[in-house]
Amino acid sequence: MIRKGRLTNRLMVLRAEKRWSQKEVAERLGISRQTVISIEANRYSPSLILAFEIARLFDKDINEVFQYIPDGSGEDD
Amino acid sequence: MIRKGRLTNRLMVLRAEKRWSQKEVAERLGISRQTVISIEANRYSPSLILAFEIARLFDKDINEVFQYIPDGSGEDD
DNA sequence: CTTTCGTGTAATATATTCTTGACATTATGT
DNA sequence: ACATAATGTCAAGAATATATTACACGAAAG
């Protein structure tokens, strides 16, 4: 589909704040460590439900974890 | 993965408010009409990026369009 | 009665997310 | 030197999201 924007996330930061390892986060979420790595590395964006679960794990609003950046708002990386 | 909650969405309502057809919404988002139908019918949850784009189309926060309902908060449908 | 539009279903195909396991690297501890 | 923990890479495959096409049905319009 046509991508009009991109995503960033603060998962690594939130994880560091809690001093949780990737393994620990994966276990708490019931997902694989690979998935945590891939999301942190922005290799792909999670499903909506996983995004909500991640936000919930860190007791944050989903917008505090994931940011949608529409095309045109800071084209460079 | 372990699902700890479920999603609902107000896409149908928002669409009705704008008096847009499914076809119109699909075209505005650059996705297929099937995808719109499937999301409205809760057959699957969209990708996070699509969820953000839907919210943006209706000029809403993502939380106003999609609600995450953790397990235990209203088990019945 | 035929056309058009909005909605729905179903089948198949492709893309993306997610899992699993194997292995490498760096850091820390004994 | 050895063990262990945390992070990372790669590859194969399962699961889910999305596209595409075709078809059905009711409502409204001619």
Image (cartoon, coloured by chain):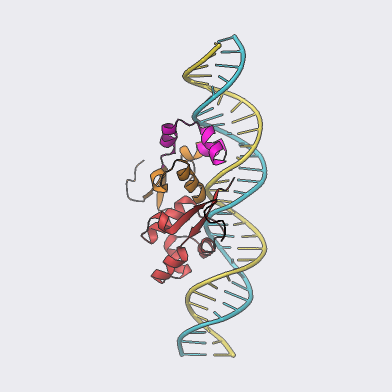
Chain colours: A orange, B red, C yellow, D cyan
Which residue occupies the foreground of this view, A75 or A45? Answer: A45
Range drawn in magenta:
A9-36
Magenta: main secondary structure: helix
Residue A39: give x, y in percent of width and height. Answer: 48, 40
The C terminus of chain A lies in quadrant: top left
Give whichever of A57, A31 is nearer the camera: A57
Q: Position of residue B32 (x, y in %)?
A: 51, 62
| Quarter of the view holding residue B15 | bottom left
Residue B26, can we see it? Answer: no
Residue B77 versus residue D11 in the image, above or below? below
Above or below, D4 against A44 in this view is above
Total tally of numbered discs in the picture: 0
Q: Work out whether residue A7 can be spotted.
A: yes
Q: Picture quarter containing residue C2?
A: bottom right
In reply to whether residue A10 is colored magenta, the answer given is yes
Front residue of A38/A23: it is A23
Name which residue lies at 40% across and 53% down.
A4
Write the residue at 49% across / 52% down: B47
Residue at far left of view: A73
Verify whether residue A34 appears in magenta: yes
Which residue shows up at 45% across the image and 30% down it?
Answer: A19
Residue D30, percent from left and from top: 46, 90
In percent of width and height, residue A8 lies at 41, 43
